[in-house]
Image: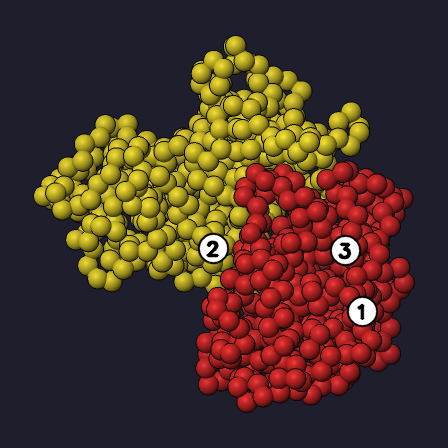
Chain colours: A red, B yellow
């Protein structure tokens, strides 16, 4: 049976009292960045709802970002969740007058914290297999891929919150074998999920083992790893992607905590090769999260689904990702963002980027009126996701961005 | 004729009154991080020397980091330099009593600012050629390399100031064709120079053209891009280096401003291929900086020079690096660090990493008592560099780090 809040919402709401994701927002009257919790279509304003917490939690929630909360620890996260859940529960309906609530559609959302470093993994089996098939069809999965969660460093400065438009990047790439300069002709999305790191983290030189890693995962968001495939192909040899990814990365504004996702744990992906000991763990740390991507065509105003996949297709778990990231002594910091890589499944509609759907641009995705290869200016791409509970959903809301034309550099 | 200060130093000092590099330090009595300027063997403490500047510059120098100064602009940088130069000049010898000075060897140096993003270029012709020769001897330089300043995103959290030891990283790599786990057996350095970005920087979506790029270069440091070659070789396909670089990066503590380097501008490297228009610039933006790397053997206590090279071997200039980095709209932020990549020259002793000297570990560097392939625990690696002026030097001091044994993960 679902729990009940005095804030009303339907059973399809992404933000029931079982969820309680955190975000940072401001309002027209008050441009201060402050922490809120989504409940139904509302936001509980944690800065001005002083009776939610006792000291010292109260101070953590007076901050303009979630940095302090992330930097605290798992017990604090749990305690905060309990306080908020109780505050919003139907038994405490008197708080409707005491608390400060906003409509979600009247606020402006902001990045939840300063992101020190952004790491992008490559951890879905089918994505790696499908991409590999385009490059090396005789051997789609490289030897190193099955031995470790491959990743690269991403650009932190260009991560933006859902709703921020993406300007089509300009750059150089090969076209008919010639070096060409101009707006990318192969603008793609990647459906990913990322987690924010927190807790008392490791010092430089000190690995985090898999059995401590879950203490350091604060919560998850949707992430669109915008990619320019022509730029990527031309620049990547041999140090990896750079400008093909750094022009924009979009995340959803609400961070769903790991406690809210606990119930949706599912079996880990069966790994074909037993990994090295530092990557082993016994506990389940995979999640059943339904994921969707869609595109809204500016001319027709039609929205088309382009992908339905699930987080559970991740081959490497977040615990393995953290253990690998730190095995060399690399220090993580609260607010660092670690992303999954494109989360593709085995079926055609589960291919979670256009490169996979179109076989590198060789075929169309048939959307009826629209034959899609890569995105056009004006397209709005939206990711969404939720876990289906018994009579309620733990949702992530939307991660949405419209594509603007390239700058005129003439 | 050299200028004169009331602080005495020799003509070989790295820090004459013509230099005036900035750093952040604290003292035994006062752990506050504060901004100082190196002069001879001394540091002028800019927090407590209130009579150096008029308002509002004074406030910029009351900060615990150089972030505010970097975020200001070229005119402010120039004005600050003039004030400090005048304050320290022999004509104003009365300031010896007014100013607060420390011995460099009695303070603790810190990172000069929070580094938001760290980018590592691959911009020296000979380094690219030598590395390429090991991998693809028939065609050492890839087609993309001559068309653009190739780069990858580095890890910001593990950048440390000179003097911080480096723990030998652990990880997986191939050994005799087998996946092996343990401390790296191929620990290498890379002699690089990096610049801090500043000024009023570009918004997301807005490129910085080459003719504006010099407004955004605050100053330069030495950078040792520690690298584990066995880990690098195994992990890099196909998203580039990750753990092989993220365990530690060391920078020198004193940021030498571009004004101090102005006099040492030299012709740009002749580019074999005329690059695309967005990468062209007329002005000289290359520098004659003598660079040295040495290793101190812990057992023998002997120091051996292992590289003598020069910054002038950079094929791509910092202006081209900035224009390329932002052509896709990627936003830079004050405090971002952009590094050169290994700066190798055409001669044997100018190869600026051990991989190049040893042909990937196939031959030794003969240091007499020591046959060097890669570094051993206890080795201390030091980079240094200076520009030779007429009777004075503009120096960068040292960038030094000792290697500690790997952690025991048994």
Answer with mark 1 or mark 3, whichever residue precedes in sequence: 3
At numbered mark 1, what does the secondary structure look like: helix, strand or loop? strand
Placement of the N terminus of chain A among the 4 image quadrants:
bottom right
Q: Nearer the viewer, mark 1 or mark 3?
A: 3
Residue A393 visible in image = yes
At numbered mark 2, what does the secondary structure look like: helix, strand or loop? helix
Residue denoted by label 3: A285
Viewed as shown, does residue A393 lie left or right of A368?
A: left
Viewed as shown, does residue A270 lie left or right of B59?
A: right
Residue B210 tag number:
2
Residue denoted by label 1: A290
Choose between A193 and B289: the one closer to the eye.
A193
Give the quadrant of residue A83: bottom right
Q: Chain of mark 2?
A: B
Are the residues flagged by discs 1 and 3 from a single subunit?
yes
Q: How far, Cα to Cα, is label 2 from label 3?
A: 48 Å
User: Would you place residue B190 above or below residue A309 in this image?
Assistant: above
Choose between B84 and B270: the one closer to the eye.
B84
Viewed as shown, does residue B359 lie left or right of B393?
A: right
Q: Chain of mark 3?
A: A
* Residue B197 coordinates in the image, percent (x, y): 44, 53
For image coordinates 50% across by 35% down, the residue present is B224
Q: How far, Cα to Cα, is label 2 from label 1?
A: 46 Å
Are the residues flagged by discs 2 and 1 from a single subunit?
no
């Amino acid at each position: 049976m679902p729990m009940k809040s005095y804030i009303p919402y339907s059973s399809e709401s992404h933000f029931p009292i079982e969820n309680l994701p955190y975000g940072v927002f401001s309002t027209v009257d008050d441009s201060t960045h402050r922490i809120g919790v989504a409940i139904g279509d509302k936001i509980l304003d944690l800065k001005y709802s002083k009776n939610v917490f006792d000291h010292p939690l109260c101070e953590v929630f007076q901050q303009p970002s979630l940095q302090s909360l992330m930097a605290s620890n798992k017990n604090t996260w749990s305690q905060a969740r309990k306080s908020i859940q109780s505050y919003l529960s139907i038994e405490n309906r008197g708080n409707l007058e005491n608390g400060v609530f906003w409509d979600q559609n009247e606020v402006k959302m902001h990045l939840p914290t300063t992101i020190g470093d952004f790491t992008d993994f490559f951890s879905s089996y089918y994505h790696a297999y499908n991409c590999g098939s385009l490059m090396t069809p005789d051997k789609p999965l490289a030897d190193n891929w099955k031995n470790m969660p491959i990743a690269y460093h991403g650009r932190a400065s260009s991560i933006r919150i859902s709703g921020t438009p993406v300007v089509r990047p300009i750059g150089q790439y090969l076209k008919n074998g010639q070096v060409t300069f101009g707006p990318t002709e192969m603008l793609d999305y990647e459906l990913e999920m990322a987690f924010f790191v927190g807790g008392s983290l490791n010092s430089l030189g000190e690995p985090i083992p898999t059995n401590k890693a879950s203490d350091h995962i604060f919560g998850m968001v949707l992430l669109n790893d915008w990619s320019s495939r022509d730029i990527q192909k031309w620049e990547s040899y041999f140090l990896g992607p750079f400008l093909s990814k750094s022009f924009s990365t979009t995340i959803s504004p609400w961070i769903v905590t790991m406690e809210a996702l606990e119930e949706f744990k599912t079996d880990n992906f069966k790994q074909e090769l037993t990994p090295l000991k530092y990557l082993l763990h016994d506990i389940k740390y995979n999640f059943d999260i339904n994921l969707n991507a869609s595109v809204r065509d500016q001319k027709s105003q039609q929205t088309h689904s382009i992908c339905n996949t699930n987080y559970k297709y991740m081959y490497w778990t977040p615990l393995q990702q953290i253990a690998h990231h730190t095995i060399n002594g690399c220090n993580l910091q609260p607010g660092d963002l670690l992303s999954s890589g494109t989360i593709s499944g085995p079926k055609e509609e589960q291919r979670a980027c256009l490169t996979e759907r179109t076989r590198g641009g060789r075929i169309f995705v048939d959307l009826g009126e629209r034959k899609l290869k890569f995105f056009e200016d004006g397209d709005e791409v939206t990711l969404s996701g939720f876990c289906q509970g018994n009579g309620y959903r733990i949702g992530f809301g939307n991660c949405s961005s419209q594509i603007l034309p390239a700058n005129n550099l003439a």
